[in-house]
Every structure is written in structure tokens, then in C-alpha cells.
Image (cartoon, helix red, strand yellow):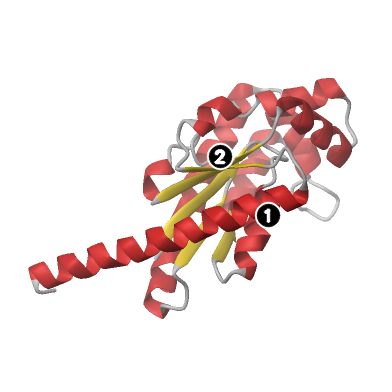
Amino acid sequence: MLLVALTGGIVCGKSVIGRLWLEKGCFVHSADTAARELMSPGTDVWRVVADHFGPGVLSEDGTIDRAHLGAIIFSDDKERAFLNGLVHPLVLERIKEMVARLEKEGRHTIFVSEAALVVEAGFARFYDKIVVAHCGRDIQVRRLMERDGIDRGKALKKIRSQLGQEEKLKHADYVIDTSGTLAETIEQTERVYAQLVLDGELKRTKISGRRRTTGA
């Protein structure tokens, strides 16, 4: 199974690309969803987060108030590093367990992890291929302002809390520019998918070749 990381800056179109590949038959995993599950009420991570950040980070129903937590970590590099250091290794552990299960089942040939912080977390080497979704900075700022209902200053603060797009692009095997129309994004996504299919076939051929050589 080909392991693919779909990464990129906030509101750069990862979810759109992921949905298109899901329709193609890829197994698409959301690192953000996994992180939310890890912080469900009563879990070990939930307890650590509540103890570290204080009761103000909890909603009335006991769930983590993501808006409140986000306001803290987007404003404080140390607090963001603390949370990432707590959650990221556990997310990767879950991904590895999932990949092992899926490979035994043999129903999927491409596993896609939609994760904004693959490069920052130092997990890029786990994947066979890195796909970076990106868009122009002005477009990114406008999208974030519209999505979150925030002003330009707050949008820029969120964007700057992540590794710059230029740095992410240095790690890319494939790039999808979502600055244009949806049709243009779909066209690029289709083209990259076709290449990933070929990459997957090449990986399987190499593995089969090694097994024949070693007698495994």
C-alpha cells in the first residue's frame, strides 16, 4: 500500500483534494479528526490538556473548547509546542496501527493521511510520497477570514503559526495549486492521483522483487 501525506497550509484545499481521492477509492485519514478523538472527555490526553491549560479550556459539557484552546496556542509558541508534542506522536501511532490493519485486509492500494503538520512534526519520512496543497498568500488570508469570521490580523497570526508554504513545498513530491477555480484544482488532483497509482504499482513491484530474491 502506498503511504501518502496530504499536507499544506491552513485553508489551502486539503479537504477538497482528500474528498476527491476518497471517491477514487483511496483510504483517507484525517489527522485532525484523530487528534479530536484523542482529546475526548475522559481520555489521558484530555486530562493532561485540562490540567495544563486549566478548566477554562473546557466547555460546559466537558469537551475541549477548541476555539479557546486555539486562541492560546496560536498566540504562544511554547504552549503550541507542548500540545503538538503531546498529540502528534499519538496520532502517528494510530496511523501506523491503521496502516498495518489495512495492509492485512488488502482492500486499499493508497493510504492518504490528510495532515497539516506532517513536516513540522518530523513525520515526513514515514510516507512514500508527500503532496502539498498550496495557494497564494492573499487568497489564503481571505479564505481564513471568511471561514473563521476573523479579521486580517488574526488570520495572519494563525497562518504564521504554521511552517511557511515555501518550506512545505521543499518537501513535496507533488504540488497542487488551489489558487484557481475548483475545476482547475480537480484537474490537478486527478493528474496527481494518476501518478500516485503508478507509484503504488512501482512500490508493489519492488516489494515482490525483494520477496522473490530473499525467498520470503
**Mark 1 and 2 residues: CB-CB less than 8 Å, in contact?**
no
For disc 2, the neighbor class at 10 Å (few under 14, some 14 to 19, many from 20) is many
Please identify the quarter of the rendering in which residue 3 is found: bottom left
Q: Position of residue 102 (x, y in %)?
A: 44, 72
Name the spot of residue 148 as percent of width and height, x first: 85, 38
- Residue at point 69% right, 40% down? 12
User: Quick check: 51 above or below 161?
Assistant: below
Q: Is residue 85 left or right of residue 65?
A: left
Q: In the rendered image, is residue 35 in sight?
A: no
Q: Nearer the viewer, residue 143 or 63?
A: 143
Q: Is mark 2 on a helix, strand or loop?
A: loop
> What residue does disc 1 label?
186
Q: Nearer the viewer, mark 1 or mark 2?
A: 1
| x 43%, y 43%: residue | 123
Q: Residue at x 31, y 67 (%)?
A: 204
Q: Measured along the vertical axis of the image, is residue 72 above or below residue 130?
A: above
- Horizontal placement of 93 versus 17: left or right? left
Q: Residue 117 carries which label?
A: 2
Name the kind of residue labelled 1 in the image. Answer: Ile
Image quarter where the N terminus lies is bottom left
Residue 94 is situated, as x and y percent measured from the top left of the image, at 48, 59
